[in-house]
Amino acid sequence: MIIKVRVIPTAGENEVVSRIGSVLRVKVKTKSIEDEANNIIQYFLAEFFGVENNYINIVKGAKGKEKTVEIRGKSEEHLKKVMDAIP
């Protein structure tokens, strides 16, 4: 599954804030939106979707706030259920 992620840096904790269509808004505890934020997003999304870290791949936007992320390791149906549970 391919999703868009909007990164909100300098948050108090790492969390999924909301979803607008297929765009996931994620707060991260770092000021950087590049390497450190990418690592946090990779580990956080892996835990959030219940997949291994290496199944999260930032396809596009590694240096920006808007990222395209590929999630593998679970069925498309399971991943959609997780996305649909986000307010």
Image (cartoon, rainbow, N blue to C red):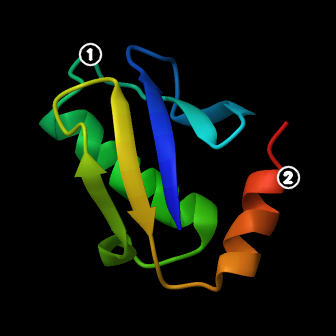
At x 37% / y 76%, what residue is drawn?
A: 55
The kind of residue tagged 2 is Ala
Nearest the viewer among 74 and 30 is 74
Q: Position of residue 18 (x, y in %)?
A: 71, 30
Q: Position of residue 16 (x, y in %)?
A: 63, 37
**Placement of 34 over or under 68, stated as above or below:** above
**Placement of 43 over or under 56, stated as above or below:** above
**Placement of 55 over or under 31, stated as above or below:** below
Q: Secondary structure at mark 1?
A: loop
Nearest the viewer among 11 and 81 is 81
Q: Secondary structure at mark 2?
A: loop
Q: Position of residue 86 (x, y in %)?
A: 80, 44
Number of residues whose C-alpha sits closer than 10 Å to that of mark 2, classed few (under 14), some (14–19) or many (20 or more)? few
**Can you tell which mark lies on residue 85?**
2
**Placement of 78 over or under 20, stated as above or below:** below
Q: Position of residue 17 (x, y in %)?
A: 67, 28
At x 59% / y 84%, what residue is drawn?
A: 74
Q: CA distance from mark 1 to mark 2?
A: 28 Å
At x 85% / y 36%, what residue is drawn?
A: 87
| Circle nearer the N terminus (1, 2) | 1
Q: Name the residue tied to disc 1.
A: 31
Of badges 1 and 2, the one in the foreground is: 2
At x 48% / y 17%, what residue is drawn?
A: 11
Locate residue 52 relative to residue 79 in the image: left or right.
left
Locate residue 83 relative to residue 22 in the image: left or right.
right
The kind of residue tagged 1 is Lys
**Can you tell which mark lies on residue 6?**
none
Q: Quadrant of residue 36?
A: top left
Number of residues whose C-alpha sits closer than 10 Å to that of mark 1, classed few (under 14), some (14–19) or many (20 or more)? few
